[in-house]
Image (cartoon, coloured by chain):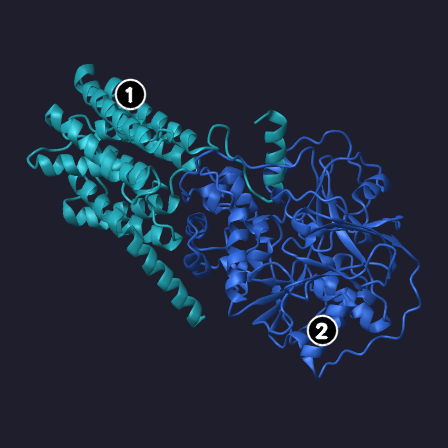
Amino acid sequence: MTWAKGLFSPGIYQGDGLPCALRQDRPNEGSSEITAPASQIIEIPLTRSLVLEGVETPRMRPVILAEPGAEVGGGRPVARDRRHPWVTLVAPQRGRIREIVRGPRRSLARVEIEPLAEAAAPSGPQILADKPAAARMQLVEAGFWAGLRCRPGDGAPDPAHAPARLIVVARLSDPAAPAVAEFLGAEDRGLLETGVSTLSELAGAPATLVHDGPDPLGGALAAVKRRSLPRGGTMRGLGAIVAREGGASADAPVWIADWQEALALGRWLATGHFDGRRIWTLLSEEDDRPRLIRAVIGTPVGAVLEALSLEGRPCLAGAPLLGRAVESLPRRADRLTLVREVPVPRRPRWTGPVLPIRRLESTLPWHEAPAALLRALAAGDDARAEALGAGALAPEDVAAAAFLCPGGHDYPQLLSAFLDRLDEAMA
Amino acid sequence: MNRACRSERARLLAAEGLRPPLPGLETQAGADAVRALLLAIVAGWTWLAAPGSPAPAAAFLPLALCLGTLLAAQAAFALLRRRPMETGGVATALMLALLMPAGLPLHQVVLAALVGIVLGELIFGGRGFGFLEPAVVGLAFAYFSSPGLGGPANPPAPEAAALAGLVLLGLGLADFRVILAGLATALALGGPDWHGAGGFLLLLAFAAADAATVPLWRLARWALGAGLVALVALLGGLSDGRALVFALLLAGVFAPLLDSAARAAIAEWRRMR
C-alpha cells in the first residue's frame, strides 16, 4: 500500500523509520560488505596528512595565520575571515603546515597539515562562565566556535550577539543511521552533558536537544528541552529542525551545535585536549545501511576508502543531492555518500513556473506553503522569502527541490544568494 | 539523461525518502502531455464510445477550431517573446471542446478559445504564472456571450472523468485536498445528477485542483474545495455547468485571499499555542 501512503502523506517519512520503499525494493546486488552491527564504529587510523578544504567556509575571505612550515596546535586557527574574525579554519590535530593552496579570488582552497604527536595537555581549562562574551572568544581561539552554526546563514555565529535559542542536534544526518544513544558510551555521555551544559550557559538562551531514539543524555540536564523527531526521510534536515523550533530570522538568530562538537567541548574542559576525531556515516551503493567510521577531521577520503577496502569514487559530504564532493573528511557534515558521478539537476535554458505539485512539496513537508517559499526565492523577493521562513534554511535543505521542480530552478544557489544579501543587510 | 545517471538520482532521492518523478514527468511539458492524454481519453470515450455519441463532425469540429486557435495564439506569443512555445494548449483545447455549450456559433467558439488562452494564461507569462485556468476563462466568456445556451450537447462521460481524475491524482498533478473537500461537500449537498457529474468531476480535477491555480497554502486548498462546491450549489446547483464555471472563476480570483487568510490563521494558532 506504499502508493496509498504516498497519496495521503506526501514525502513524510514512511512511518517505519526507514527510507523510502524504493530503496528497500532495490535488489541486493551481491552480498553486502557490512557484517558489523549497525552501531559499531570503525576506527580509521591517523594518516600522514590531513587536508582542510576551503569549501567548508565558502564565504570566507581568509587571513592566513600560519605559514607553511609552522607548527600549529590542535584546535588552533589556521586562517580567519577578514570581515568576521570568529569564522576560522581550525587545525584538527597538532601538526606542521605542509602546504596552503589559494583558490580563485584569493579564497582558500586547501590547507595540508602533517600531523605530529600530541603534546601533553594542561589540565582542563577554565571557562569564564561569569563573562559569556569573553568565554565565547575563548571558544573561538580554542577552535570550538568553528563547529557551531547559525541560522540565518550557515556559518559560525557572531559571538557578540546572543541567540534566541540554542539547538543541540544529537542525531546523525543519514536517515538510516542508528540513534546516537545506541553507540554512546557512559563516559562520552558524561562529557556530552558537560558540553551541552556549557554551550547552554554561554548561549544564554533556551536550549533544545533534538534526538531520535532514546535520550542520549539519559534524562540529565532537565532544563534543556527535549525534542524527539521521527526517523527517516525529509524530516532530518536542519531546516526542518529549526523551523519546528520556531524558525530563525535576522532579529532572532538560532545557534546550532552538533552533538559531536558538544562532546569534544566536554572532553576539552575535562582534559584540556582538543579532540579532532569525529564520527561520520559512509554509504556506498553496495550497502543497505551506512557504516559508522571515526577518524580525524581532514583525513583524506582516499585513505578512508583504502582502509575499508572500497574502490575509489567521488564522495559527497552532507546532503548528497547538494552534490558537494570532498577530498577529505569535513567537520561540518557527518554524512558521506559514495557515488558513481556527482548528481546534477536538470538546468533548462528557460526556467518555468514554481507549481505546488506533490513531489515538490514533499521536499519541505514541514512547511505550510513550500511552493510559496520556493517561488519567493525564484522571484528574488527577499522580504517575502524571509517572512516565509527562508532564514531557517541552508542550501542543503532545498537541494532536493532543485531535482524535483519541473521549472528547473537552482534553489541552493538562489538561497545562497538570498542569505548573502541578508548577511550584507545585517552587517 | 542516461540510465546510469537516472538510477543514481533515484537512489539518492530514495535515500532522502523522496520518490523520483516518473520518466517523462520531470518537465512541465511532460506533465502537460499527460493532462492532454487523459483529456483525450475522456473525449474519445464521450464522443466515440459512450451511448448517444454525436456525429464525429459535430464533436471534433469545435475541438479542431479550439486547437488551431490556441496553438496559433501560443505560437504568436512565443515568437514575440522569443521563448519556447507553451505546451498546455492541447489540454485546454480538449477541456473547452468537451464543455463548450451546445449551439454556440463557430466564430464564438474561436473567440472563447482566444480570450481564454490569452487572458487566462499568455499575458501572465504562460502556464503557472497566472491565477486563472484558461479553459474556465474561455467557458465563462462563452456563457457570458451567449446567455441563453445550456451545457454541452454531450457532457463528458462521468466514468471517464472519474478515471482521468484518479490518474491525475495518482501522478501528483492534481491536489488531493481540493478534490477530497469538493467531493465531500458535494456528497453532503446531494451530489450532481448523472448528466452533470462528468463535467463536475472534470472541472474539479483538471481546473479546480490544477497545480497552476490552486492556493499555495495547504490549509487554503481545503477551504477552496469545500467553498467552491458550496458556491456552485448556491449559484445554480451542482449539475449546472454554468454555475461551476462561474464559481471556478471566482475561486481563481479569490485564491490569493484564501492564502492570506490561511497564513493569518496559522500565525494566530501558533501564537496561541
Label 1 resides on the chain identified as B
Q: Quadrant of residue A257?
A: bottom right
Q: Residue A137 has which mark?
A: 2
Q: Amino acid at mark 1?
A: Gly
Q: Which residue is mark 1?
A: B44
Is residue B93 visible to us here? yes
Other residues around mark 2 within 10 Å, as few (<14) / some (14–19) / many (≥20): some
Measuring from the top left, give residue B151's x and y in whole percent.
15, 32
Give left or right: position of A107 versus B66: right
- Furthest toward the front, the residue is A105
Whether residue A302 is situated above or below residue B48 in the rendered picture: below
Note the chain letter of the cyan one: B
Question: Which residue is at a point 48% across and 59% down the rendered structure image?
Answer: A389
The answer to which of A61 and B24 lies nearer the viewer is: A61
Is residue B160 visible to us here? no
Check the rendered structure and report the hue given to chain A. blue
Which label sits in the foreground, 1 or 2?
A: 2
Question: Which residue is at a point 57% across and 59% down the rendered structure image?
Answer: A153
Question: Which residue is at a point 74% across and 45% down the rendered structure image?
Answer: A282
SS assignment at label 1: helix
The answer to which of A265 and A378 lies nearer the viewer is: A378
- Furthest toward the bottom, the residue is A130
Label 2 resides on the chain identified as A
Q: Amino acid at mark 2?
A: Met
Q: Quadrant of residue B12?
A: top right
Whether residue B230 is situated above or below residue A271 in the rendered picture: above
Give left or right: position of B186 versus A122: left
Q: CA distance from mark 1 to mark 2?
A: 74 Å
Measuring from the top left, give residue A303's x and y in whole percent.
84, 43
**Quarter that holds the N terminus of chain B:** top right
SS assignment at label 2: helix
